Image (spheres, grey):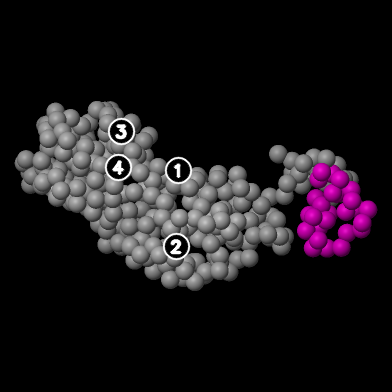
């Protein structure tokens, strides 16, 4: 990659002189400016997007608000952030990552920066307190999540309701009648986090249509709690034949805990996870799963935001259909 130092060496000037010649921040002689411009053309130099914005050019920064709150799965957030950054760079934009838990205050500070062209929001709540501020912004935004009232907004997410339904349908078709959902941490539900509630509603709605008996168990994301949780599920629900796990840190520990307590998987107990594909193939037995496409969500979110920046119409909600892959942990009841 050509750097400003390379340009300075070719033009026979200092790097700071190159910066001044490109930004116009300080007066530079016409002869020096021509030498710098010639070196830029010869070497194919492209200034860093953030540097251009700070130099007073067009805003070339996207702000990603991904608060690291209790119960948030940091590996998924980081995977999403990497996807956003990579896609933004392909569009010659940089990314400002906002991880504070604050709501409107953080948005106001980000939008106060002239370099910020648009905003991406993750960890969306059903009644997210940031939404009124978003609707009033003079810059475009995209939510990675689906609130209860998405009017006036642009949203992209996995269709979590359909994901919950897909898990139940897969099990019902194999004769299961008693199914439990090991869900997200309690604080995630208490905050009204959209994806957790959408999945739970899809799970319970499909179970009602199919005539299944279900129970929902919010669970702390602590692997040390898996043995106690597995024992309680089997004790309180002796007819249980299947478990859906939407809590990534508990996936492998729960499978091991069930096995130690006696049930064969999938002979006595079927297991489905909602998680990234690589996690579903990590345990000793590959797990039937609905893929959590963090990488694709990051790509879609940035693409939608870039279209809005160009003034191109975009849909209000883009929901990715769930993809269920059958592996070794589900079978007939």
Helix, strand, or loop for circle 2?
loop
- Residue contact at pointers 3 and 4, CB within 8 angstroms: no
Circle 4 Cα neighbour tier, 10 Å, few/some/many (<14 / 14–19 / ≥20)? many
Sequence order check, earlier mark of 1 and 2: 2
User: Mark 3 highlights which residue?
Assistant: 325
Sequence order check, earlier mark of 4 and 2: 2
Foreground mark, 1 or 2, reads: 2
Q: Is residue 21 magenta?
A: yes
Helix, strand, or loop for circle 4?
strand
Drawn side of residue 224 relative to residue 305, left or right: left
Could you give the CA–CA distance between mark 3 and mark 4, rounded to whole angstroms? 10 Å
Q: Quadrant of residue 24?
A: bottom right
Which label number is shown at residue 274? 4
Helix, strand, or loop for circle 1?
helix
Q: Position of residue 316 (x, y in %)?
A: 43, 58
Drawn side of residue 280 relative to residue 59, left or right: left
Foreground mark, 4 or 2, reads: 2
Could you give the CA–CA distance between mark 1 and mark 2, rounded to whole angstroms? 20 Å
Could you give the CA–CA distance between mark 2 and mark 3, rounded to whole angstroms? 32 Å
Q: Position of residue 284 (x, y in %)?
A: 28, 28
User: Mark 2 highlights which residue?
Assistant: 153
Q: Position of residue 108 (x, y in %)?
A: 52, 70
Circle 2 Cα neighbour tier, 10 Å, few/some/many (<14 / 14–19 / ≥20)? some
Q: Magenta residues?
A: 15-41
Q: Quadrant of residue 102?
A: bottom left
Q: Quadrant of residue 237?
A: top left
Which label number is shown at residue 296? 1
Q: Is residue 88 visible?
A: yes
Sequence order check, earlier mark of 3 and 4: 4
Q: Is residue 286 above or below residue 60?
A: above
- Residue contact at pointers 1 and 2, CB within 8 angstroms: no
Could you give the CA–CA distance between mark 4 and mark 2, rounded to whole angstroms? 26 Å
């Amino acid at each position: 990659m050509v750097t400003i130092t390379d340009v300075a060496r070719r033009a026979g000037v200092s790097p700071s002189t190159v910066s001044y010649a490109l930004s116009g921040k300080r007066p530079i002689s016409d002869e020096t400016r021509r030498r710098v411009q010639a070196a830029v053309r010869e070497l194919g130099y492209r200034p860093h997007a953030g540097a251009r914005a700070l130099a007073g050019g067009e805003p070339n920064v996207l702000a990603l608000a991904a608060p690291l709150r209790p119960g948030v799965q940091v590996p998924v957030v980081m995977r999403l952030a990497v996807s956003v950054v990579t896609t933004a760079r392909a569009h010659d934009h940089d990314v400002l990552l906002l991880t504070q838990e604050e709501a409107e205050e953080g948005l106001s500070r980000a939008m106060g920066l002239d370099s910020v062209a648009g905003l991406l929001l993750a960890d969306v709540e059903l009644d997210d307190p940031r939404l009124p501020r978003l609707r009033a912004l003079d810059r475009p935004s995209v939510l990675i999540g689906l609130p209860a009232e998405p009017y006036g907004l642009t949203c992209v997410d996995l269709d979590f309701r359909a994901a919950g339904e897909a898990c139940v349908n897969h099990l019902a078709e194999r004769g299961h009648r008693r199914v439990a959902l090991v869900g997200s941490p309690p604080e995630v539900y208490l905050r009204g986090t959209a994806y957790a509630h959408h999945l739970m509603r899809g799970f319970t709605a499909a179970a009602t249509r199919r005539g299944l008996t279900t129970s929902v168990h919010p669970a702390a994301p602590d692997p040390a709690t898996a043995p106690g949780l597995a024992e309680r599920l089997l004790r309180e629900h002796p007819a249980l034949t299947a478990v859906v796990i939407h809590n990534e840190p508990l996936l492998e520990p729960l499978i091991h805990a069930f096995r130690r307590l006696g049930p064969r998987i999938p002979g006595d107990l079927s297991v489905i996870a909602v998680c990234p594909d690589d996690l579903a193939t990590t345990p000793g037995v590959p797990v039937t799963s609905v893929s959590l496409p963090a990488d694709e969500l990051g790509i879609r979110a940035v693409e939608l935001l870039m279209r809005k920046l160009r003034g191109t119409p975009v849909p209000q909600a883009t929901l990715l259909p769930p993809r269920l892959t059958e592996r070794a942990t589900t079978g007939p009841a």
